[in-house]
Image: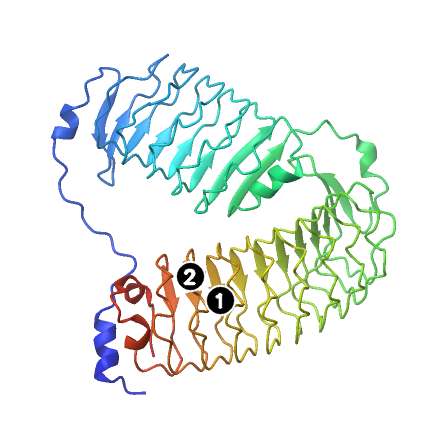
């Protein structure tokens, strides 16, 4: 179409997403307030106010730091305890580094005043436990490093308020995580968890069909069996019972016998992508109750039994993309309450049941592009309040319900291009204040005012294209 004046006017209101503004010169008064001789005050490359007391053999923390401190480095000292009230006036602190000390415990409330904190480094200490509300006020925390401590357990709801947490490193823990801890960890985007299991005897690798599969331990001492790319038409019957990772990618599997995975009760990862699977038995995964990652993409699946995932309650990532699925049963994902990533793109889905995602309350990433969806129920995403990525491009959507995204207040990426949208309801994105990318290109939309001209300049600045 030829853009009307109203469209051009809306486009002129858009601002570039990736803009680096030049901060105003920071007053040198900040440097004057750096009174402790063991610390150095400076500005980093982003002109952020930094105080470094790194490697000064400190046994206690200096009492005075500049009020506007944004980065505080206390790493490589001999701190054993942190007194409550440390730098309470540092309300603009964004990065705190306490790595390489001798910290054995942290008092409740120690970080409460750091409401702007984004990076927290606590690794290489001697921490044995953490208070349940230790990170309660750090709602903007994104990177957290806890590895190389002596942690034996974590409170179940320790990360309950940290909905923006992206990166958690918690390796070499002297424990086997209980389910409640695992549940807390599965809320995160990037997880590096390494427990310290007892040495696994080589007998566990037997039996292993050497000509078809390779049996080994990965760097985390997990028993891994790889039978990928062997042109298998059936799964070998003799495989190690304690297998945790089973890779059957890139074979010629067309059918799976009922019970074929029943003996693998320790299975965490199962790779079945790039085969020729046409259907799956109802109870095929019923004994794999510890399954976390299941990959079934690029097969020829046309439908799935309703209860096929009913026993996989700890499933974290499920990939069903690039199949021939035409519909999904209501309740098929109901028992996967810890589901975090769900890939359904490149199928033939024409509609979705209203409550299909209602039990997946921790869902963060949902791919529905390249299907044949014509409409969506109004409440289909209402329970997915943690959702950050939603891809609906290349469908046949003609309109969207008024409140379809109203509960998705954490949504950051929304892709709606290549549909048949002509208009958008008023204030449809009014609750999505965290949006970074909104793509409405290749629709038939002429006017943005109806959805975005109500003072929500944040939404206007996120629209990447409009044709």
Left of 83 or right of it: where is 299? right
Q: Which residue is mark 1?
A: 391
172 w.r.t. 277: above or below? above
- In this view, the residue in front, 239 or 91, is 91
User: Along the polypeptide, which appears first: circle 2 or circle 1?
Assistant: 1
In the figure, residue 214 lies in which quadrant? top right
Going 46% across and 42% down the picture, which residue do you hit? 161
Q: Residues within 10 Å of mark 2 (few under 14, many from 20)?
A: some
**What quarter of the picture does the N terminus occupy?**
bottom left
For the residues labelled 2 and 1, say whether their Cβ atoms are less than 8 Å apart: yes
Position in image of residue 345 (x %, y %): 57, 68
Tell me where residue 19 sits by quadrant: bottom left
Relative to 137, is 251 on the left or the right?
A: right
Q: Is residue 10 above or below residue 112?
A: below
Q: In this rendering, would 11 be left or right of 238?
A: left
- Please provide percent x and percent y for residue 83: 37, 18
Going 68% across and 51% down the picture, which residue do you hit? 313
Q: Whole-percent x and y of residue 437?
A: 37, 63
User: Label 2 to label 1, Cα distance in Å?
Assistant: 8 Å
- Left or right of 406? Residue 326 is right
- Give the x, y percent position of residue 93: 30, 34
Vertical placement of residue 321 versus 206, above or below: below
Residue tagged 2: 413
Label 1 SS = strand
Q: Quadrant of the C terminus?
A: bottom left
User: What label sits on residue 237 in the rendered view?
Assistant: none
Q: Quadrant of residue 306?
A: bottom right
Closest to the observer, 429 or 24: 429
């Amino acid at each position: 179409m030829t853009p009307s004046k109203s469209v051009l006017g809306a486009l002129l209101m858009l601002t570039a997403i990736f803009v680096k503004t030049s901060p105003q010169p920071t007053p040198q008064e900040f440097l004057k307030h750096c009174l402790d001789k063991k610390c150095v005050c400076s500005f980093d490359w982003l002109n952020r106010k930094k105080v470094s007391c790194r490697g000064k053999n400190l046994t206690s923390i200096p009492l005075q730091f500049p009020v506007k401190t944004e980065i505080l480095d206390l790493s490589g000292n001999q701190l054993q305890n942190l007194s409550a009230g440390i730098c309470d006036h540092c309300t603009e602190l964004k990065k705190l580094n306490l790595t390489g000390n001798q910290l054995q415990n942290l008092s409740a409330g120690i970080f409460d005043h750091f409401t702007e904190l984004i990076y927290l480094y606590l690794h290489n200490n001697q921490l044995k436990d953490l208070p349940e509300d230790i990170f309660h006020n750090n709602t903007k925390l994104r990177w957290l490093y806890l590895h190389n401590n002596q942690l034996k357990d974590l409170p179940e709801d320790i990360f309950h308020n940290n909905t923006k947490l992206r990166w958690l490193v918690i390796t070499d823990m002297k424990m086997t995580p209980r389910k409640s801890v695992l549940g807390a960890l599965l809320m995160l985007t990037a997880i590096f968890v390494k427990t310290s299991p007892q040495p696994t005897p080589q007998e566990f690798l037997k039996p292993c069909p050497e000509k078809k599969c390779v049996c080994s331990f990965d760097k985390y001492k997990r028993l891994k069996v790889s039978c990928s790319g062997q042109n298998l038409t059936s799964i070998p019957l003799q495989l190690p019972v304690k297998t945790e990772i089973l890779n059957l990618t890139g074979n010629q599997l067309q059918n799976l016998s009922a019970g074929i995975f029943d003996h693998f009760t320790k299975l965490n990862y199962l790779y079945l992508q790039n085969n020729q699977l046409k259907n799956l038995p109802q109870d095929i995964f019923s004994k794999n109750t510890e399954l976390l990652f299941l990959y079934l993409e690029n097969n020829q699946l046309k439908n799935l039994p309703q209860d096929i995932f009913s026993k996989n309650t700890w499933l974290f990532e499920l990939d069903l993309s690039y199949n021939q699925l035409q519909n999904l049963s209501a309740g098929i994902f109901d028992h996967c309450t810890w589901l975090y990533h769900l890939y359904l793109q490149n199928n033939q889905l024409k509609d979705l049941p209203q409550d299909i995602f209602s039990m997946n309350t921790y869902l963060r990433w949902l791919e529905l592009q390249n299907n044949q969806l014509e409409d969506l129920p109004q409440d289909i995403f209402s329970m997915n309040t943690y959702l950050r990525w939603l891809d609906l491009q290349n469908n046949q959507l003609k309109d969207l319900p008024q409140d379809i995204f109203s509960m998705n207040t954490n949504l950051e990426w929304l892709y709606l291009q290549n549909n048949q949208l002509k208009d958008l309801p008023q204030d449809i994105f009014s609750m999505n204040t965290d949006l970074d990318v909104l793509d409405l290109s290749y629709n038939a939309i002429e006017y943005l005012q109806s959805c975005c001209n109500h003072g929500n300049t944040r939404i206007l600045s996120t629209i990447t294209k409009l044709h």
